[in-house]
Amino acid sequence: MGKQKYYDTALKPERAVLVGVIRPGETQEETKEFLDELAFLVDTAGGVVDRSFTQKMLKPDRATFVGTGKLEEIAAYVKSEEIDMVVFDDELSPSQLRNIERELQVKILDRSNLILDIFAGRAQTAQAKTQVELAQLQYLLPRLTRLWTHLERQKGGIGMRGPGETQIESDRRMILEKISLLKGRLKLIDKQNETQRKNRTELIRVALVGYTNVGKSTIMNMLAKSEVFAENKLFATLDTTVRKVVIDNLPFLLSDTVGFIRKLPHHLVECFKSTLDEVREADVLLHVVDVSHPNFEDQINVVNETLKDLGARDKPTFMIFNKIDAYVSPEIDTENGEKTTLTLEEFERSWMANDNAPALFISALHKENLEEFKQLLYDKVVALHTERYPYDKLLY
Ligand SMILES: Nc1nc2c(ncn2[C@@H]2O[C@H](COP(=O)(O)OP(=O)(O)OP(=O)(O)O)[C@@H](O)[C@H]2O)c(=O)[nH]1
Ligand SMILES: [Mg+2]
């Protein structure tokens, strides 16, 4: 049964329709970016996006997320085009989910659910698996009465990986018991990890942080000459990897962690807090940005907010603008003759002038500005080490 479901999914990708609400003040471009990101999530989960529906609203409808007219339109489309699932760009409340399911009669996923599903497919270590399972059960608990979980159980596919069918069918109490069991297991793993971390406190710790898919693992591999899994999919990395890096005989620890994304389900953030201990306890953060992404400035804000949540916003931070090789030069707007965006040089100048967040522009893929990057790390690590161990003779 377990094998069967992956086989089915691989054979015929599920076709999805996306639904998003356009809030007041949101530009067309922003809406497009948000839905593109949702489409990328569906793609990462193994589905194919057929089309998307949007509706301008002050805020999502309490009962049905979009208006009933729009929902009918979606229902008709889903039926005539034989769509497998409808994916909403926000977390649906249990009652919204029920109402929409009743109307659409097809598998409904929301953004949280989709992210959880991708995480479930990616989790490798006992810690990550336990964290994701815990988040999934917490998400599931208020939403036990779902139509499609019964319909789709035989077929499997997106949204069906993870805790498995038995829990879905079982009553609340069983789920609650499982939640407390998983929490206990996580506490134990945390304790073991804490001991491990304590054993290597003498080295300066640098953490790579940033939005998902910006190139953190690629940078890790470049600096540590390691083989951390990197690919053009969202959330390629779930577990934190720590490597010892040596630049000019100067050793320090570099960690690579899970990427952030807007509207990350809060259960998941909670459950992944211990994975992010490495970030919380780091001496320096390298905030990696994909400068070739049209929305990179929003992504910077999302990362800063998440860092604030983690209590890691005040750490010394370097902004590492990656993928300069793929930066799209601005076009001239034909209407007013103005440039649509800044040139890379203009961006560089404005960021370099900001003393609070020292910045560096690189391409990890083409190893551009790699020497400057290493020098920056070297200087910072030496400074921190000297500050912490004034009498220590370093190897350098
Ligand atoms: N063009 C270009 N692509 C890059 C560069 N650095 C990384 N990439 C590509 O960006 C994609 C994502 O890279 P990863 O290193 O997996 O990114 P990540 O930040 O670790 O992503 P997650 O672990 O999913 O959060 C891969 O396809 C990389 O090859 C770069 O400098 N230029
Ligand atoms: Mg990664």
Image (cartoon, rainbow, N blue to C red):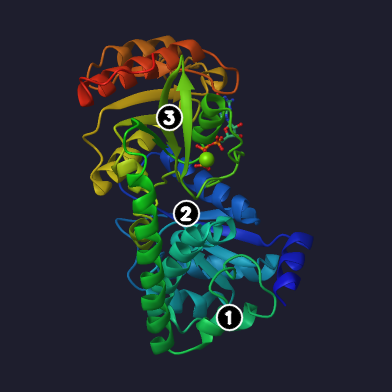
Horizontal relation, residue 351 to residue 50: left or right? left
Q: Earlier in the sequence, mark 2 or mark 3?
A: 2
Q: CA distance from mark 1 to mark 2?
A: 33 Å
Q: Residue at x 38, y 56 (%)?
A: 272
Local packing at callout 2 (Cα closer than 10 Å; few below 14, some 14-19, many 20+) is some
Q: Classify residue 367 by image quadrant.
A: top right
Q: Residue at x 51, y 66 (%)?
A: 109
Q: CA distance from mark 3 to mark 1?
A: 39 Å
From the image, tell me which residue sits under label 3.
289
Secondary structure at numbered mark 3: strand
From the image, tell me which residue sits under label 2.
54
**Ligand 1 under 8 Å from disc 1 Cβ:** no
Badges 3 and 1: C-beta atoms under 8 Å apart? no
User: The residue under label 1 is which amino acid type?
Assistant: Glu
Residue 211 percent across, percent down from the top left: 43, 39
Residue 328 percent across, percent down from the top left: 53, 20
Q: Quadrant of the N terminus?
A: bottom right
Q: Earlier in the sequence, mark 1 or mark 2?
A: 2
Local packing at callout 3 (Cα closer than 10 Å; few below 14, some 14-19, many 20+) is many
Secondary structure at numbered mark 2: strand
From the image, tell me which residue sits under label 1.
165
Q: In this view of the protein, which residue sits in the foreground, 198 or 292? A: 198
Secondary structure at numbered mark 1: helix
Q: Which mark is residue 19?
A: none
The answer to whether 267 is drawn above or below residue 226 in the figure is below
The answer to whether 149 is drawn above or below residue 123 in the figure is below
User: The residue under label 3 is which amino acid type?
Assistant: Val
